[in-house]
Image (cartoon, rainbow, N blue to C red):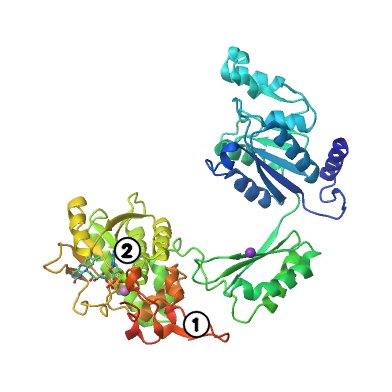
Amino acid sequence: MHALRNNFHNLGRRFGRFRLYQSHNKEMPKTAGIIVVGDEILKGQTKDINSHHMCQSLHELGVDVKQISVIRDDVDVIASETKKFSALYDIVLTSGGIGPTHDDVTIEGIAKAFEERVVPNPTLVELCKKYFGQGFKDTPKMKLACTPQSAELHFGVDKVKGERLQFPLISVKNVYIFPGIPVLLNRLFDNLKHLFTTDDHFFMEKLLVNAFETDIAPVLTACAKKFDGAGVQIGSYPDWFNNYYKVKVTVESANEDATKAALKELKDKLPQGCLLDSHKYCSDPVAQNGVEAFADIFETEDPILHHKIENSIEILNEALTMYSLDELCIGFNGGKDCTALLHLLYAAICRKYPQRNSKLQALYIQDEHPFEELEEFMKHSTNRYNLNVITMKGAMKAALDTLQSQQPYIKAVVMGTRCTDPYSKNLSAFTPTDGDWPYYMRISPILNWSYRDIWTFLRKLSLPYCVLYDRGYTSLGSRDKTQRNEKLRYTDNQNNVKYRPAHCLQNEDLERNGRL
Ligand SMILES: Cc1cc2nc3c(=O)[nH]c(=O)nc-3n(C[C@H](O)[C@H](O)[C@H](O)COP(=O)(O)O)c2cc1C
Ligand SMILES: Nc1ncnc2c1ncn2[C@@H]1O[C@H](COP(=O)(O)OP(=O)(O)OP(=O)(O)O)[C@@H](O)[C@H]1O
Ligand SMILES: [Co+2]
Ligand SMILES: [K+]
Ligand SMILES: [Mg+2]
């Protein structure tokens, strides 16, 4: 049975794309199954990243991964799963369980699947001798030199050094046995890609859709059905935190024309206006952080905001000449104003210090009852801008007092205050804190920006902002003292109460309507 299958494989290899696949004999991409072995994964003590890496790489190579199975370190379980996968898929990749200890039984399990014995492999014995010295045979290391009888060895070549890798990948029939340690697995995989390379290639297109999944499901279902025969797969992936679209729809197949046809069908059938223009959306605005880039974008469309941006950048540059990065922090609590400001400050810092190692410091005075969504957004921003967040609890004045004693080198706080904020009418770009506050220099680069300016800036650059602003909040304080803005309330045609996003607020004077 396996000899027969292997013959088909060899045939397939020889004739390129014309391969025979089990019951059907039409042209289909090569299939794969992945078996992840390890008690530690099932116990939640280790997170499996190996299958993810394999799936990514195999997909790039045109291999259709059909299944991942996570199983425990047990000879019989490994044997039965291997037998099943080996018959179902063109290739099988296993991860883990090939070390020297009692719980490493993958080799034994795979041998059992094919009714083979585990025997010393002469090449591996030689290698182990070189690596561990003569005496290794009487130690647990001997286990590393043993394989199922029909095993083949595949030596990778280190792409950088050009040398043969020390240890080979072991395969038995169509099963490739990878080590569980991620760096070893990745090294082997990346240096042995030719084993898995196919003539196929997946053609993927994506649509970013600003509509609820429930509303587009009928169109997706119809399209998936229509193009199923052509091997087109349609995926729908909601993103709860994206501010610009709700669902990413993917269209994919091994045939470029089929992919294009299905894409066109979707574009025609999805509701008007819900597709995001890919030219207007940037998925990684932080990478495009050049200060010049902002200016260009607004120059013709909004010359007034363009001028304000340039002015803000001048203030930031001045701040960066007055204070070192150690002496400076941004007051950042996830609010919209400091989100816009953070992007500007980050760009200015990247320009002044292109080679810097130090992180931008952010001061977060954490409320007793913060919004979960705001904290979530804080975490994302921390990663996105590589921030060093100094979190202080308690009332603002007291928190600043504590900051002074704990981090005495901080001298100035860059803030997203605008002159329409309470008590801020008479602030200027550099104003020390009031007499009854701990002494800091307050730097306010966006004082003269309007509410509208903030939203134009954030949305034009596709910057991520806290999702609460998409749900009717227009200004954020503590959870117990902040509500949605009633000006954004409406009832939809099914009589449900809904709120428009913050950027739709027309009358800017009502920004703080939801603040109690
Ligand atoms: C670093 C820092 C310094 C501040 N300095 C002052 C100050 O000198 N005088 C003042 O009245 N408020 C000061 N505040 C408080 C702010 O003006 C404002 O009340 C606070 O950011 C809350 O704004 P919100 O009510 O819009 O949420 C300061 C806040 C921070 C984070
Ligand atoms: N808890 C805090 N921790 C650190 N900085 C803060 C905090 N609260 C306010 N700030 C600073 O003061 C600025 C003004 O606060 P404000 O609440 O008006 O703006 P925001 O939080 O950015 O947005 P929004 O007006 O939508 O709440 C912020 O942009 C930020 O720089
Ligand atoms: Co504000
Ligand atoms: K889905
Ligand atoms: Mg706020």
Q: Name above or below for residue 398 compared with residue 515.
A: above
Camera sees residue 197: no
Q: Percent from the top left, x then y, of residue 165?
A: 61, 31
Give the residue drawn at x 70%, y 49%: 67
Given residues 217 and 32, the one toward you in this image is: 217
Q: Quadrant of the N terminus?
A: top right
Q: Which residue is mark 2?
A: 332
443 on left or right of 8: left
156 on left or right of 338: right
**C-alpha distance separating marks 1 and 2:** 32 Å
Q: Percent from the top left, x then y, of residue 66?
A: 72, 51
Three-letter amino acid code at disc 1?
Val
Q: Name above or below for residue 5 compared with residue 67.
A: above
Image quarter for ligand 3: bottom left
Q: Residues within 10 Å of mark 2 (few under 14, many from 20)?
A: many
Can you name the residue that lies furthest to the left here?
Answer: 435
Q: Percent from the top left, x then y, of residue 364?
A: 30, 60
Instruction: Tell me if the residue at label 1 has its CB under 8 Å from ligand 2.
Output: no
Camera sees residue 127: yes
Give the residue drawn at x 62%, y 37%: 188
Quadrant in the picture for residue 404: bottom left
Q: Percent from the top left, x then y, of residue 159?
A: 60, 38
Instruction: Tell me if the residue at label 2 has its CB under 8 Å from ligand 2.
Output: yes
Given residues 83 and 327, the one toward you in this image is: 83
334 on left or right of 214: left
Q: Quadrant of the C terminus?
A: bottom left
Three-letter amino acid code at disc 2?
Phe
Report helix, strand or loop for mark 2.
loop
Counting residues from the start of the chain, the first of labels 1 and 2 encountered is: 2
Report helix, strand or loop for mark 1.
strand
Q: Which residue is mark 1?
A: 497
